């Protein structure tokens, strides 16, 4: 008998993930992107920015052996999430600067 070079049993290291796992990873990629966009809203978006950063990293980590069509969204979310923290920090600093500037001048009215 001639031995066939192609085995019927796939190599466990290169096995294709199940379709449901692929769908879940793509869905997490898209949700993380949307959370990242909402995370850009100052102060209100802080929890969304955190969720985007975490979910973007998780989605990218679960698809190392196959091509995730939504990988660009996960990659963008892992950058947009921390940018949301930066936007909120700048917003808070600007508000505190404006608030402290209102106290200068004695607080007196006209007159």
Image (cartoon, rainbow, N blue to C red):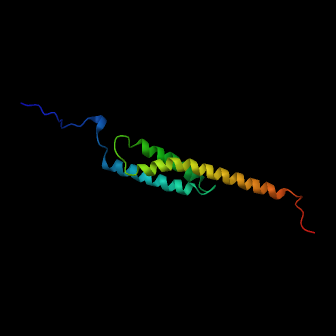
Q: Residue furthest right?
A: 111
In front: 57, or 47? 57
Taking 105 as reference, is 54 above or below it? above
Q: Position of residue 36 (x, y in %)?
A: 52, 53
At a point 47% along the width and 44% down the height, the residue shown is 57
Where residue 107 sits, quadrant-wise, is: bottom right
In this view, 66 is above or below 73: above
- Measured as percent of width and height from the top left, residue 111 is found at 93, 69
Q: Would you say residue 51 is visible in this rendering? A: no
- The residue under the point 39% across, 49% down is 25
Residue farthest left in this picture? 1
Percent coordinates x, y for residue 44 in the rendering: 61, 57
Q: Is residue 52 left or right of residue 85?
A: left
Residue 42 place in picture, x, y as percent: 63, 56
Is residue 31 rendered to the left or right of residue 66? Answer: right
Query: Does residue 77 appear in the picture of this structure?
Result: yes
- Name the residue rendered at 53%, 56% in the picture: 37
Q: Is 27 displayed left or right of 14 in the figure?
A: right
Q: How many marks?
A: 0
Screen quadrant of the N terminus: top left
Observer-nearest of 18 and 104: 104
């Amino acid at each position: 008998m001639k031995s066939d070079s192609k085995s019927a049993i796939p190599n466990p290291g290169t096995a294709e993930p199940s379709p449901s796992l692929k769908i879940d990873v793509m869905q997490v990629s898209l949700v993380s992107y949307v959370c990242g966009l909402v995370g850009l809203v100052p102060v209100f978006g802080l929890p969304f920015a955190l969720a985007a950063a975490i979910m973007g990293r998780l989605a990218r980590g679960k698809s190392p052996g196959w091509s995730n069509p939504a990988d660009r969204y996960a990659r963008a979310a892992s950058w947009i999430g921390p940018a949301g923290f930066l936007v909120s920090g700048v917003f808070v600093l600007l508000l505190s600067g404006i608030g402290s500037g209102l106290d200068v001048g004695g607080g007196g009215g006209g007159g």
